[in-house]
Every structure is written in C-alpha cells, then in structure tokens.
C-alpha cells in the first residue's frame, strides 16, 4: 500500500477510536428490575407473658454474718396495666417472690399488657429505691451493669416461668478473661446467684446468658455500701441489643461533687471499635468524647459535666452496648443504671410506680418531633427539638405516648430515699403483620 | 489396423469451453470415427454452433438424462457402427486414445466395454480413474485415485466397471443390455451397466494406454444440482444404496432398508471424526430417497439379476488391501510451507516457560475447594447432579420456575467434565488456569502475525498480565475472566479455519471455533456478538471456507437457545446478554486504567500502518474499534471482555510494529520498557487488593440434609433468615448450587401459589404457633427447617414446636426435622424437547474438534502449488 493509503489508515483508525469515545453519550434504556415483594402474614401470637423478679435478695442475712444465707427481703410493688385480651394469670400487687403475668391477645403491644415493679428498701445493709420494667422472658441477653470489688455486690436473679426445665449458660466477660457457669432451673423455679465467686472482684463485667430451651427471666441486682452504710441498691433487666447508635435519655447530674457518673461501653464484636459519645445538655453545655472500645472488652467514660440533664448518644462503626451509672444524693445515697432506650414509633404505654416521676423523651434525629403525652389528667402535645430531650413530670398510674416519628423514653423515679430509672420496652410476641420474603 | 467401426457420442450440457477442447481432441484422433454426434441436453446454442463448426452431427433432444441422451445420439446415427465411443463434454481424449481402445477391443472378442485411463484435466500427471468397482457393501469404489501417473498401472486389465467418460462399448451389447438405466442414480449408472455386461458374460477392461483428461464436473459438484439430484455426497450415497440393492442377498437388502435410520444415526460420529459432516446429510437424504423408491430399486434388482449369475462380480470387488491403501492415500499430501509453520512454536522457542508468570499471578487461586466469594456458590456434588441444570428451562425455586438456567452452566459442565467427582474443584482449576489459558491463546494467535518469539511472548504476557485481565482475576469476576481467556483462542481457531488447505482441516478448526464461540457465548453473549460478526466478515472475505465457518455458530446458538426462546416469549431482548447470576454488572469502559492502557497501545500500534500488510491492519484495528464501540454502547452487561478483546488486537499490532524496528537498540529498549510495564501490572493488579477465594467444601447444607436428600431427591428444606423482612427460602434437595441459579430471576422474580403457604409456615415458625403449622406443612412439602441466622429468640420459638425434632446446631445454622408426613406431590422439572439437540450439537462439534487422521495427517502441505 502506498504512503497516502497508509496515512488514510492511521486517520481512519484514530477516527474510529474517537467515534468509540463519542459513543459514550449514547445509551439504551434498560428496564429496572422489580424489587421482590414481601408477604404480610398474621398468625396467632403466643400469649404475652411478663415476669417481675420480685423482692430484692439479701446475702449473708441482716448483719451480713450469716454465711451462705440468701433470702428475698420485703415485698415488691407490682403495677400493671391491662388492655384488650384475656388475662391468663393475674398477680398480687405486692409480691414476695417473682411473679409472671400472662395475657392472650391478638394485637400485642405495651397497650395490651405492661408492668413495672418497685421496692423502696431501708435496711442496715441495703437501702435505696429499686424499680424495673417487668419484661418478657428472653432466650438470651446481656447484662452490662455488673459491680464488684470493694463496696459493691452483685446478685443475679434468674427465673424459669415455664412448665419445663431449662438450663441457662452464663458467661462472665471480665476485663482480661471470661468464664462460664451453667444454671439449671426446674419448672417455675427462680434462683438468686451471688456473683462474687465468678467475677474475681472486677469493677466492671458483662454477663451473657443463653437458655438452652424456653425463655427465661434474668435481672441483676447491685448493692453498694460505704463502710457499714448502705449507699444504694438497684435491680435491672437485660440491656438493650447491641447497635451502632444508642440513645440514653434522662441522664441528670444528681450527685455533683460527691460521686461521678460513668458510662460503660461494651463491644461484643471480634474487632476493636471507635465510639463517639455525645452528652447533649439541655440548657447547659454539651460534651463529646471519642473512645476506642477493645474487642469483647469495656471502655469507661467519666464525663466532667455541669449540673443539668443530658441526652447521651453513642455512635460507632460497630455494634456496641452501653449502660450509664448515675449516683444520686438525696436524703440517702442511691444510684441508678440508665439503659439505652428502645426506639418507638406510634403508641407506647408506661405504668408508673407510686413515686415522683419524670418522663424523659428524647429525639436524637435532626428534625423536630411531636409527641402526644396522655395522662389521667388529659393529653398534651409536646414538641421535642432535634437532637435533644425533654423531661416532663408525670403523675398517675400510667401514661401513654404517641408520635409519628421515632422517639426514645426513660422513666425517672426519685424519692428522698432513692433513685431509679425504668427503661420501657415493647411487649410483643411475633404474630401480626410479619413481613416474609419467600424465595 | 483400423478395422473397428466406431461412432462417437458426445453428451454436452452447456459447457462450451470444455466442449471445444473435447471436440478438438476428437477431431485429432488417429483412429477413424465413423460419425460424431453431439447431444446437447441443455440446448446451448454456443455448444451447438461449436459442434457444427467441426462438421459433427448435433441433436437437441431436450433435458434428457445420461442414458436417454446417449440413446438419442445412437438413434441419430446415419450408419450403424460396431462400437460407440461415449464421451462427456468435459472429457478430452489424447490423439491415440481411441486407437488404443480399439486395439484392445480387437484383441479380445469377449471384451464388450473398454475404459480409458482418466487423468485430471488440470493436473495431467494425476490419475483420476482407472476402473471402477464396489466395496463388499456395494459402495462405488475407484481402483486408482489421486495417484501420480508413473506408468505403474499401465496394464490392460479386467475391472468390474469403467466410467462412461471415454467408454468404448459394443453397440450390440449396449442394445442387449438396454443401455444406461436412467432410473438408476447417476453415479451408479456406469457401474450398473458394466456390471450387467459382466453378469451377461462379457468382459469389461481398462486400457491404460488410452488416456483421457477428465474435468470430473459431476464429482467436483460443478454440474447443476439437478444433474446428480443433489450434491456429490448425496449422489454417492444413493449409488451405494442402489448397488447394494442390486448386489446383496435378499435378506440383507431388507435388513438394510429396515435399519437405515439406525445406520444413518450410528454413522454420524464416524463422519464427524472423519471431518465429513456433509456425508451424514447425504446418508440421511439417501435413506429418505431409498424408502420412497423401494419399488424402483427392487425392479432394477430384478432386471439386473435376470441377466445371469452374479458370481463373476465377486472376484472384482475391491479387496481389503485395496480399500486400506486408498484410505491411507487420502492423507498423503506434501509438507506445508506457510510462513507461520516455519516459525518456532511456543515449546521449541522455550517461550512456554513464561507461563509461570501468569501462574504465579494466580497462585492465590490454586484450587483447594469450592470458591465461595462474590456470590459464587459451590457446584453440584458430581457430574450427574450438575448435568440436569445445563440448558434447562426451569430452575429449582419454589415449586419450579419456568426460567432458563444460566448459559454459564456450560462452563460448569466443562468443569464437571474435568473433575466429574468434584465439579467445584474443576471449576476452581479452570479459574486458576484462566490466565495461563489466556497466555497460551495469545501466543498462538500472535504467532500467526509475528515472527520473533520474544515479541510474541511479550504480546502474550502483555495480554495475560494486562491490568484488565488481572483486575478480573483479583476481583474473582470469574465469568468475564473465563470469557476473556477464551477470546484469543477463538480468534486463533478462526484464522486457522480460514487458512485450512482442505475441508477436513477446515472442519476441524471450525469444530474448535464452534466450541470456543459457545464458551464465549456462555460467559459473555455480548463478546459472542462481536466475535460472531468477526466470523461473518471472515466468512464473506473467504467464501471458499465461509460456508464451513458459518456452521461454527451452531454450538453458540444451541447454548443461547433457552435465553433466546425466553427473550422471544417475553419480548425482552436484553435478557440475551445475561449469562450468569454471578456476572459483573455494567462497568465504565473508559475508566482511567483502560484509558491509559489502551492509549499506550494505540500509540505503539499505529506505526504498523507503515510496516505491515493493510489487510492485517484493517482487520485488527477494525476489530479493536468494533470491540470498543460495542463496549461503550451496551449498558446491560459487563464490557470487560470487549475492552480486553480490543487490547488484544492492539497488542498484536504493537508487536508487529516492534518487530519491524530495525535498530536492535530501540527494539530492545521498547522490549525492556514493555517488560517492566508487564511486571508492574502483574504486581499491582495481580497481587494487591486480591479478593480471597474462600475455598470451602462443596456442601451447602447440613450433612443430615445432604444424606437425606441422597435417599429422597424430592426433599425440601425451609431456610429462615431473620431480618427485616424475614426471609424464607425453599431449598431443593441438597441445597442451592451455582448451576441452579438464573440471572433472570432478578428481572423476573419468582411467583408461585406456594409462596403464601411458605410465608405462613415461616411466620408460624417464628411465632411458635403450631396450630396452623400442621395443615400448612401438609399443603406443601417441608422436610427440614434451617434457621440460618443465629437468633436465640426465634430458635427458642421454633424449638417449642412439637412437630419439629431438633437436629442440632450446624455450620449452616440450627436444624430441625419436620416429623409430619408430607403427602404433597413435588412438581417435576419439565425439560424442553430441544434440549437433547443442544447437547447433540455441542457433542457433534466436540467430535469435529477431535484431532483424527483426517485432520492430523496431511497437516503440513506446501502452499502455492507443489515445487
């Protein structure tokens, strides 16, 4: 081929390549694939069952000298609210042992059945207010608020509300090690277990429990003392599920200058995680702390905060759990563990023990939220600004909250002799509107 | 002495050029010819004028067949001769031909028919025919064929038959036997006529000194198809059946006619192995023809046998040694001397050692189990389990969904054939070997264009270690990787098929090309579209091999048939590009890496316009531009194989450009730079950011389920994954394997009545509600329940159900066995009746691709004529 022909070849080649480049603008429409649709199925749910752990347990008798003695002391007040449905078992209002409340109902929410228990105790070795939500038995869960070491005592309450025997595996996660223990419970049996021998006086520990069969009810009782003086007591059910975002509403500085609150973060995952903790003050300063949480380990945050109330947000790149220790000084010393709240939308019913109470409603989102609060006295719409919380004093036996948006709630109980925080939970067995994707 | 009276009958059919040569030769005969009659059966005026110009008689009897045409010529003779000399217009006798034939007739009074030595018209030293006979089954057999004439056969001898071209026959015998029978297939007419003469007590001989040059238009397929009533192969097939009917014993004839279909079928593999697929078509048409003309054949048999005993024929049948000699002779050709055959091969040049580099780059993929990353599932437990899902038109989802399984399953079948007991391992081995396959393929392709082994090696390494191919390898984009590794082989097979010197070789390369195209189509239909067009262009550019090349589409079309049928039914042609559920989604064809690599290659390859053949430049640049254009236009599937195909073409052009650099320093400098680039690419894209293949065992369900599925293939497991929403998967048998997937499932989600029941089962399981569960389970078959995501709450709920028997925690989740008796019928998969044909086509091409004597012997041959 002659030179002009070859040059033409080069030109054609470049033109062809340029043409391919310009074809980028051309595109064909491709039909979008339809998303697979799930099927909504409703079935009869199991009867809704709640379990109240009953009175607090005292180890070593009244004086602490009775070795091996473990006894439930006093009576716990149980308050509950019933919705539509038929009650399977109804408890007494003051109980001396753990008690189950069961109700058969098609639609299951806190409006169907909700219960709390409380006990104000004043004994030489144990004083304070212990109040907790009576929750649904669980197959497994975590308890983060273990306290051991000097001046602290932890007792685990385990109960089997079923007609068949169960075995519960307890795994104690300490700072550097873990150990496990098996508990077997006969039908309807409950046990209290002193944890001193399992946790090696560690100041912080987490407990994971898992039932081998039916669901069980587990709660952790903590007692503190200074010398011979009792400085508080508390009873708390399992903590919230691990999540990348946790919200703890209702945190107040209640013992300024005397004792410091402390946020305990636990990372159940196999890799270390970074957590960003934000203390969003209401009418006061906020604080942000970044901390690394080791794999299967703890991190403690002790914020230096001014007096006031705060919404605590924990955000992380991994799923974490948290509990906030909050000391209280009134007529007596006491303390409470604040658990991350569950995100609610729609309606929530809360039963209130007979103590002065405040409901802390948090809105960690970036948009304002309206919540309708209904008390015996009537209803009131409350606007919660973005990334903040409101604390509203409440009176009565129960209250209900309703909102279109997502809100977080803790119920704060205060008494001159004690302090407790109840974290409401949804009460529901799977049954209605289960979305199933069938492949 | 010329005492024999001979009249010549020349049968002509509109071939004036040849007729002119023939008539000229007749006019120069040393033996007097009483009369020459030209019988023009096509009424061609040029031929008529030509004959008249020689002063010969001419008749135009119309479109008669050969026997009637000769008879018409005889009838038109003015005087009755003793002998007639039959000639075709494509037979050119030498001046002494008739003299020698006449002498032979005079010497032996018992001789009634004498045939000359027929030589190739275009190659006068090669014998075309020297007597005819049959094989023991009645197939026409040439005693001498394609031998150089060195006088080795120059003895007059008895034979069963001679060709009508140049045949000297006693007119009395002709009339006694009734001449040629036109109800007989054309290629058996001379055979039958001569055999009749033999049976009637006459001799038929060949006079080797009488030489006639014969074009053999009928045998070369240059006559109108109506002349032979089909192709030459069909003519032979019919001649075979006809003569078998005449010659073989009655019981055998009936047996043959009854078993003809079976014989046709059984002979297909043999014909394919001999690279003569057209023979099967001929045999098929022969069978149909024979069945529809039984009375005519039997009448011919009766006439034949009424002439006398067949014993004289037996001694003249082709002997075993004659037959084997001829088979051997078919493959004797001269050594090839094409430029690429003189270049050192990959092994002779020690370039094969460089395959270690792609192997090292793939070391992480060394097969130790089933690859289980990027959605790649293990394959069926063995070949038997995998096979039903290849080319299937339904997938085992819910109660069987009518969607074609992925074309990529043909690759999985290949993996299963490599490792029948552990297909997953075979598949992992294929993926591991992909870069090496690409290297070898690119080397073989490069050798067709480039002469220096080191440059070819650089091209092959440049391809197999290109950033594009290594990125596919490192990301375990196995579908595109395998497609890209097959592209150089496809082009190599195409070029070899195009350049094959005989049809057997062409068929063999076309067989390989067909299989390669099928594999490309199975992995990347869009790349198949590119290569399909390339094959078409190649076929048009070289029509001699074009028809054979076009057959190579068949396997790919067979592979894509289920998708095509679905596309037609759904009126959605975009599904034709969806080869696999694990294929990549569309990517940016002009990403930074592609731009850099292609840009450099364009710069390196452009100088080839000034140093290489324009045809090569047009071909390769055109291919690259087409590949890039297609990769840009199509938004449906990954364009990676197309971009890589473009890079391959540019690499070869760059190699050509580099080869032509005269200065050793510059050439070495370019070589070193390219080597450095290849090594950099190998390290950066081959080793950094690799996706680990996560080799696992090929079991995807708990051992208990797998064992139970061995006992009961209809077993079903409901796999529950807790989440928002709850997911319930109805799993067949031993679990979901890669071959069970369909890329179309995403576009056409499964819908079935069973979904409601399964959703209710799942909901009642997680709710722990047994009351509704029992009737639901009897509605649809669920043998096991597997909770795949750990969720103690749900686990406790399911465990509380009496109807489920806990089967323990497994690696795949918590398992329960359903204790109820499931009575529901399990729907069976219905396969398309076309499916066996799909396998048949692929198997036929595999037979074509197999190297056999037909394609290996005679591999080397001088091009451009013998020297």
Image: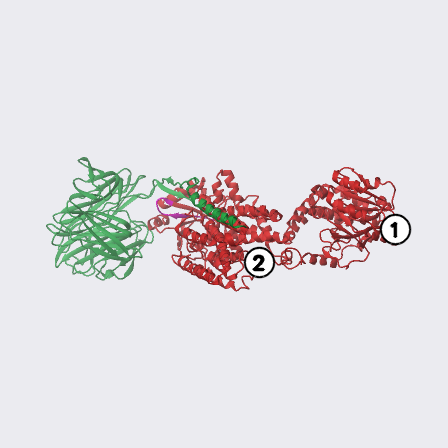
Chain colours: A green, B red
Residue B701 in sight here = no
State the count of labels.
2
> Which sits in the foreground, B547 or B761?
B547
Label 2, secondary structure: give it.
Answer: helix
Checking the image for residue B2, the label placed there is 1
Counting other residues with Cα less than 10 Å from the Cα at mark 1, is it few (<14), some (14-19), or many (20 or more)? few
Q: Please name the residue shown 51% across and 41% down the image.
A: B566
* Above or below A344: residue A260: below
Q: Is residue B724 magenta?
A: yes
Task: Please state the horizontal and vertical placement of residue B484, each as a whole percent of the image.
Answer: 48, 52
Quarter of the image where the C terminus of chain B is located? bottom right
**Residue at the extreme left:** A331
Give whichever of discs 2 and 1 has the lower sequence position.
1
Please indicate whether residue A398 sits to the left or right of residue B67 in the image.
left
> Which sits in the foreground, B203 or B787?
B203
Q: Chain of mark 1?
A: B
Checking the image for residue B458, the label placed there is none
Q: CA distance from mark 2 to mark 1?
A: 58 Å
**Quadrant hosting residue B292:** top right
Q: Is residue A250 magenta?
A: no
The residue that label 2 is drawn on is B340
Q: Chain of mark 2?
A: B
Q: Which residues are magenta?
A: B713-726
**Residue at the extreme front:** A3
Task: Please state the horizontal and vertical placement of residue B43, each as a whole percent of the image.
Answer: 75, 38
> Which sits in the foreground, B62 or B361?
B62
Task: Please state the horizontal and vertical placement of residue B592, each as a whole percent of the image.
Answer: 39, 51
């Amino acid at each position: 081929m002659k030179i002009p022909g070859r040059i033409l070849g080069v030109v054609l080649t470049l033109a062809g390549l340029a043409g391919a480049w310009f074809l980028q603008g051309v595109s064909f429409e491709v039909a979008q694939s339809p998303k697979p649709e799930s099927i909504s199925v409703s079935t009869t749910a199991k009867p809704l069952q709640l379990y109240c752990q009953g009175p607090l347990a005292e180890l070593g008798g009244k004086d602490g000298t009775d070795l091996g003695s473990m006894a439930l002391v006093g009576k716990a007040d149980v308050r509950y609210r019933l919705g539509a449905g038929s009650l399977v078992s109804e408890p007494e209002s003051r109980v001396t042992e753990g008690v189950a409340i069961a109700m058969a109902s098609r639609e299951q929410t806190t409006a169907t059945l909700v219960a709390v228990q409380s006990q104000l105790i004043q004994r030489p070795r144990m004083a304070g207010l212990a109040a907790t939500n009576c929750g649904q038995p669980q197959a497994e869960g975590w308890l983060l608020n273990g306290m051991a070491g000097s001046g602290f005592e932890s007792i685990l309450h385990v109960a089997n509300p079923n007609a068949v025997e169960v075995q519960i595996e307890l795994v104690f996660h300490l700072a550097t090690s873990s150990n496990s223990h098996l508990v077997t419970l006969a039908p309807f049996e409950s046990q209290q277990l002193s944890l001193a021998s399992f946790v090696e006086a560690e100041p912080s520990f987490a407990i994971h429990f898992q039932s081998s069969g039916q669901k069980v009810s587990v709660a952790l009782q903590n007692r503190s003392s200074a010398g011979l003086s009792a400085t508080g007591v508390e009873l708390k059910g399992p903590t919230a599920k691990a999540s990348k975002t946790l919200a703890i509403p209702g945190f107040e500085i209640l013992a300024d200058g005397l004792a410091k609150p402390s946020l305990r973060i636990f990372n159940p995952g196999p890799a270390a995680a970074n957590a960003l903790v934000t203390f969003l003050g209401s009418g006061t300063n906020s604080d942000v702390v970044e901390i690394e949480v080791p794999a299967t380990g703890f991190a403690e945050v002790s914020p230096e905060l001014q007096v006031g109330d705060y919404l605590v947000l924990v955000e992380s790149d991994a799923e974490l759990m948290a509990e906030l220790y909050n000391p209280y000084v009134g007529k007596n010393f006491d303390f409470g563990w604040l658990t991350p709240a569950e995100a609610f939308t729609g309606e929530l019913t809360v039963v209130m023990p007979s103590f002065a109470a405040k409901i802390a409603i948090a809105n960690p989102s970036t948009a304002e939220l309206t919540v309708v609060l209904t008390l015996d006295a009537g209803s009131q719409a409350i606007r919660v600004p973005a990334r903040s919380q409101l604390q509203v004093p409440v009176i009565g036996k129960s209250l209900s909250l309703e909102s279109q948006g997502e809100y977080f709630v803790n119920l704060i109980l205060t008494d001159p002799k004690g302090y407790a925080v109840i974290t409401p939970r949804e009460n529901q067995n799977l049954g209605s509107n289960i979305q199933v994707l069938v492949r | 002495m010329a005492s024999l009276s001979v009249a010549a009958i020349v049968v002509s059919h509109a071939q004036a050029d040849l007729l002119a040569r023939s008539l000229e030769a007749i006019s120069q005969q040393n033996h007097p010819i009483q009369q020459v009659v030209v019988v023009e059966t096509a009424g061609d005026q040029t031929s008529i004028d030509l004959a008249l110009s020689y002063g010969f008689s001419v008749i135009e009897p119309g479109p008669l067949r050969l026997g009637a045409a000769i008879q018409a010529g005889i009838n038109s003779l003015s005087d009755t001769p003793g002998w007639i000399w039959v000639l075709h217009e494509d037979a050119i006798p030498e001046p002494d031909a008739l003299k020698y034939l006449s002498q032979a007739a005079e010497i032996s009074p018992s001789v009634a028919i004498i045939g000359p030595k027929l030589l190739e018209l275009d190659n006068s030293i090669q014998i075309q025919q020297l007597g005819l006979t049959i094989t023991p089954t009645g197939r026409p057999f040439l005693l001498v064929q394609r031998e150089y004439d060195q006088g080795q056969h120059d003895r007059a001898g008895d034979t069963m038959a001679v060709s009508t071209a140049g045949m000297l026959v006693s007119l009395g015998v002709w009339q006694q036997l009734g001449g040629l029978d036109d109800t007989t297939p054309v290629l058996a007419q001379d055979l039958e006529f001569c055999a009749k003469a033999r049976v009637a007590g006459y001799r038929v001989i060949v006079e080797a000194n009488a030489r006639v040059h014969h074009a053999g238009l009928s045998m070369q397929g240059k006559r109108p198809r109506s002349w032979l009533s089909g192709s030459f192969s069909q003519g032979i097939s019919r001649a075979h059946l006809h003569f078998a009917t005449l010659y073989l014993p009655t019981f055998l004839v009936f047996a043959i006619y009854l078993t003809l279909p079976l014989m046709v079928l059984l002979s297909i593999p043999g014909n394919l192995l001999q690279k003569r697929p057209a023979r099967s078509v001929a045999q098929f048409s022969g069978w149909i023809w024979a069945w529809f003309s039984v009375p005519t054949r039997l009448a011919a048999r009766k006439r034949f046998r009424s002439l006398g005993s067949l014993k004289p024929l037996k001694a003249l049948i082709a002997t075993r040694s004659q037959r084997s000699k001829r088979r051997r002779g078919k493959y004797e050709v001269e050594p090839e001397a094409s430029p690429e055959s003189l270049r050192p091969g990959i092994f002779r040049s020690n370039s094969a050692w460089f395959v270690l580099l792609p192997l090292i780059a793939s070391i992480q993929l060394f097969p130790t189990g089933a690859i289980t990353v990027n959605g790649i599932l293990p394959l069926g437990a063995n070949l038997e389990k995998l096979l039903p899902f290849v080319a299937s038109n339904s997938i085992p989802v819910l109660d069987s969904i009518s969607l074609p399984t992925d074309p990529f399953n043909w690759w999985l079948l290949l993996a299963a054939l490599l490792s029948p007991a552990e297909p997953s391992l075979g598949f992992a081995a294929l993926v591991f070997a992909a870069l090496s396959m690409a290297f070898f393929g690119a080397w073989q392709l490069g050798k067709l264009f480039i002469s220096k082994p080191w440059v070819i090696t650089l091209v092959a390494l440049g391809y197999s270690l290109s950033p594009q191919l290594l990125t596919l390898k490192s990301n375990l984009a196995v579908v595109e990787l395998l497609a890209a590794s097959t592209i150089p082989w496809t082009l190599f097979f195409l070029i070899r098929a195009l350049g094959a010197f005989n049809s057997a070789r062409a068929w063999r390369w076309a067989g390989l090309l067909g299989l390669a195209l099928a594999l490309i189509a199975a992995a990347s239909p869009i790349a198949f579209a590119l290569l399909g067009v390339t094959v078409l262009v190649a076929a048009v550019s070289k029509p001699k091999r074009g028809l054979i090349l076009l057959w190579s589409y068949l396997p790919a079309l067979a592979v894509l048939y289920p998708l095509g049928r679905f596309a037609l039914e759904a009126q959605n042609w975009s599904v034709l590009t969806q080869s696999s559920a694990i294929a990549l989604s569309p990517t940016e064809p002009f990403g930074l890496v592609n731009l850099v690599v292609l840009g450099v290659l364009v710069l390196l390859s452009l100088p080839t316009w000034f140093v290489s053949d324009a045809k090569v430049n047009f071909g390769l640049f055109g291919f690259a531009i087409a590949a890039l254009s297609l990769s840009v236009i199509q938004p449906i599937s990954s364009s990676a194989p197309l971009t890589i195909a473009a890079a391959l073409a540019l690499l070869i052009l760059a190699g050509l450009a580099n080869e032509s650099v005269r200065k050793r320093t510059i050439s070495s400098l370019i070589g070193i730079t390219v080597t450095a680039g290849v090594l950099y690419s190998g390290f950066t894209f081959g080793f950094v950011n690799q996706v680990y293949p996560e080799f696992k065992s090929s079991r995807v369900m708990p051992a208990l389920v797998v064992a139970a599925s061995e006992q009961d293939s209809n077993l079903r497991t409901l796999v529950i994954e807790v989440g928002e929403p709850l997911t319930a998967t109805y799993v067949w048998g031993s679990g979901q394997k890669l071959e069970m997937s369909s890329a179309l499932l995403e576009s056409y989600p499964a819908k079935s009545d069973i979904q409601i029941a399964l959703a209710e089962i799942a909901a009642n399981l997680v709710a722990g509600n047994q009351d509704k569960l029992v009737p639901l389970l009897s509605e649809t078959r669920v043998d096991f329940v597997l909770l795949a995501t750990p969720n103690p709450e749900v686990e406790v709920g399911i465990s509380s159900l009496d109807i489920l028997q806990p089967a323990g925690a497994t690696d795949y989740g918590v398992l329960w066995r359903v204790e109820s008796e499931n009575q529901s019928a399990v729907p069976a998969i219905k396969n398309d009746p076309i499916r066996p044909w799909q396998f048949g086509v692929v198997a036929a091409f595999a037979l074509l691709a197999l190297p056999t004597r037909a394609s290996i012997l005679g591999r080397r041959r001088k091009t451009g004529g013998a020297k």
